[in-house]
Image (spheres, rainbow, N blue to C red):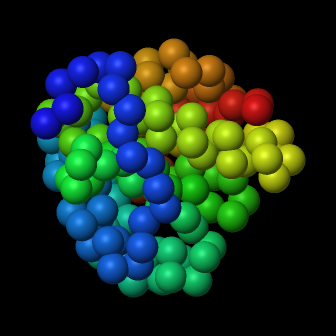
């Protein structure tokens, strides 16, 4: 495991055959760090919308969403997915890699690519657990916290 907080990870777009591994990582991290802030309804809704829903998975196969992965050697340790309309849909990092620069490097790669394509702004809905991180990397709230189907989130944006 890469223990150096300033170490670089391999960041790349995931291949379709890597999506199951990515969704397993998302669910593991969600259960431990995000689910405690959600109601049972919110946990079930997240699972249905982001883990088990075939339409969401098909969005990656049809290039409507792109999933980036962060690798420590061959181990997938973090993911970030973004839609064609520049909305970040998922950011999750293996618990053993929290506070080691994984999410920051994922955002750095994605932001760099978006700037090259003239994108001016990205959006996301932050879970309560992630709000401090997003503020630290430059996101600002666009509204107060909301609840939708039991999912607590704060809408945010970042100008690139």
Q: Nearer the viewer, residue 82 or 105?
A: 105
Identify the residue at horizontal 54%, vertical 38% (top origin): 107
Q: Give the quarter of the image for residue 34.
A: top left
The image shows residue 68, relative to residue 99, as above or below, that is below
Q: Is residue 97 left or right of residue 68?
A: left
Q: At 39% from the left edge and 46% from the top edge, which residue is drawn?
A: 10
How many numbered badges does the structure rendering display? 0
Across and down, in percent, residue 85 comes to 72, 59
Please name the residue shown 24% across and 49% down the image.
73
In the rendered image, the quadrant that contains the N terminus is top left
Q: Position of residue 67 (x, y in %)?
A: 47, 61
Kindly indicate the quadrant of the structure image that contains residue 52.
bottom left
Q: In this picture, is 66 found above or below 76?
A: below
Q: Residue furthest right?
A: 118
Seen from the viewer's position, the closer of residues 18 and 128 is: 18
Image quarter for residue 54?
Answer: bottom left
Residue name at image x 81 percent, y 52 percent: 117
The answer to whether 144 is drawn above or below residue 75 in the figure is above
x and y percentages locating residue 63 in the rendered image? 60, 76
Left or right: where 157 falls relative to 25: right
The answer, for residue 121, to whether it is visible in the render is yes
Q: Is residue 141 visible?
A: no
**105 relative to 119 in the view: left or right:** left
153 shown above or below 65 = above
103 relative position to 21: left or right: right
């Amino acid at each position: 495991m890469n223990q150096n907080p300033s170490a670089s990870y391999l960041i790349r777009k995931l291949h379709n055959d890597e999506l199951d591994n990515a969704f397993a990582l998302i669910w593991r991290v969600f259960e431990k760090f995000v689910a405690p802030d959600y109601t049972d309804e919110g946990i079930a809704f997240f699972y249905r919308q982001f883990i088990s829903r075939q339409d969401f998975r098909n969005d990656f196969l049809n290039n409507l969403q792109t999933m980036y992965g962060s690798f420590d050697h061959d181990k997938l340790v973090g993911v970030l997915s973004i839609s064609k309309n520049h909305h970040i849909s998922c950011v999750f990092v293996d618990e053993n890699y929290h506070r080691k620069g994984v999410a920051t490097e994922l955002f750095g790669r994605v932001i760099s690519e978006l700037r090259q394509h003239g994108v001016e702004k990205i959006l996301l809905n932050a879970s309560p657990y992630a709000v401090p991180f997003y503020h630290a990397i430059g996101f600002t709230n666009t509204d107060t916290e909301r609840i939708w189907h039991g999912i607590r989130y704060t809408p945010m944006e970042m100008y690139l």
